[in-house]
Image: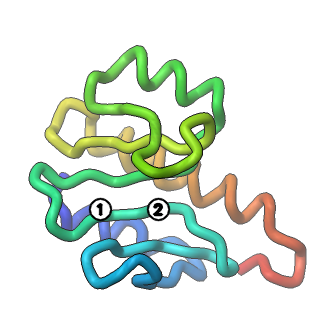
Amino acid sequence: MTHDEIRTVCAAKRGAVETYPFGPNTAVYKVGGKMFALIPRDAEPPHVSLKCDPEWSEVLRNAYAAVSPGYHLNKRHWNTIVLDGSVPDDEVEELVAHSYELVVGSLPKRAKP
């Protein structure tokens, strides 16, 4: 998955907003004002950090060398995934959806898209 493809997947989520709170080199996707994905623009190979259920995080980290604890994030709840092709694109899309759903599920009713 390319940098543009992962950005398109994140941006397609209902109510998703692309922001740059950490500067122009890191796209942060939010829903209801909360982050669900971070994508450094200059990373090569590209990578994405996504929120994840802690138990599923462990499974993913054991299954894929490209999945590691979230870089500069809560290591229990965030994973950084290197998009080098070792994690199938459909699984990356599923992980984006999972991150989005975790965040939407934590929002108050009035803030849900």
Q: Residue at x 19, y 52 (%)?
A: 1
Looking at the picture, tell me which residue is in the foreground, 35 or 24.
Answer: 24
**Labels 2 and 1 touching (C-beta < 8 A):** yes
Left or right side of 2 for 95: right
Q: Which numbered marker is on residue 51?
A: none
Left or right side of 54 for 59: left
Q: Residue at x 21, y 70 (%)?
A: 41
Tag 2 secondary structure: strand
- Give the residue number, with chain letter if any, for mark 1: 6
Label 1 crowd bin: few (<14), some (14–19), many (20+), radius 10 Å: many
Front label number (2 vs 1): 2
Residue 85 % position (x, y):
16, 38
Q: Is residue 100 above or below residue 62?
A: below
Residue at the extreme right of the image, as rendered: 109
What's the amino acid at mark 2? Answer: Ala
Q: Is residue 25 above or below residue 37?
A: below
